[in-house]
Amino acid sequence: MRKWLTVFLYVSLIILTFIYRYDLLEWLRADHSPVLSFIAATLLAFFPVLPYKLIIGLFGYMYGSTSALLICWCATTLAAAIMYGLVKYLFQQRAVTYLASVPSLHKFTSAVQRRPFVSVIVARLAPVVPQSAVNIYAGAAGLPFWSYLAATGIGKLPGIALYAFLGDRLFE
């Protein structure tokens, strides 16, 4: 039942975001409250309706590269921690069963669990690995939270810094 509720909420938020996309973008442009922008950035990171690189660029354009880096880095790290916690505490039993049932995935999970910090940093730095997949997998595999969070924070910095800088220099 929880699974369907999660899917329903996620799809509903995507539909609402699509319907009100122009209003949301206008709100992000007009309102320069860092707290509200942080909340918006966290929600957009948790529910990836748009590619988050565009959001970081938009924040870089609005606030400058340093402020955008700080807001987006904190927002994505918070969203990653929340997603990790939801998966770990709501779906871990099913996920562990699934991870153990596929032999190659079980070997991969064992390797990741031996070096969780390095594994998460490498996954965060790889541009082809979806960030939400890293969050879900880390929660499902039961990686240590603080190691996961530290690696997530470090691994996200270069990409966020690049896109915040590009957004800041967009029209120069």
Image (spheres, helix red, strand yellow):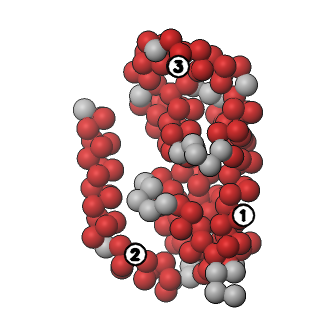
Q: Is residue 39 visible?
A: no
Quarter assignment of residue 158: bottom right
Q: Secondary structure at mark 3?
A: helix
Q: Nearer the viewer, mark 2 or mark 3?
A: 3
Q: Considering depth in this image, is 29 or 131 the residue closer to the camera?
A: 131
- Camera-near label (1 vs 3) is 3
Residue position marked by numbered label 2 in the rendering: 24
Residue 22 in view (yes/no): yes
10 Å crowding of disc 3: few (<14), some (14-19), many (20+): few
In the image, taking residue 4 as reference, residue 165 lies left or right, namely right
User: Tag 1: residue type?
Assistant: Ala
Q: Position of residue 62 (x, y in %)?
A: 60, 81
- What amino acid type is highlighted by mark number 3? Leu
Residue 44: % across, % down: 47, 61
Residue shown at the point (65%, 44%) measured from the top left = 126
* Residue type pointed to by label 2: Leu
Task: Report the quarter where the N terminus lies.
Answer: top left
**Taking 61 as reference, is 6 above or below it?**
above
Q: Crowding at label 1, few (<14), some or many (≥20) Cα neighbours within 10 Å? A: many
Task: State the residue at coordinates (59%, 21%).
Answer: 109
In the rendered structure, the answer to whether residue 59 lies left or right of residue 6 reads right
Q: Nearer the viewer, mark 2 or mark 1?
A: 1
The quadrant in which the C terminus is found is: bottom right
- For marks 2 and 3 on the same chain, the one whose residue lies earlier in the sequence: 2
Mark 1 — residue?
161
Distance from disc 2 to disc 1, alpha carbons, whole Å, reads 24 Å
Instruction: State how far apart marks 2 and 3 are (Cα).
Output: 40 Å
Residue wearing tag 3: 105
- Element type at mark 2: helix
Q: How many marks?
A: 3
Query: Along the horizontal axis of the image, is 73 left or right of 138?
Result: right
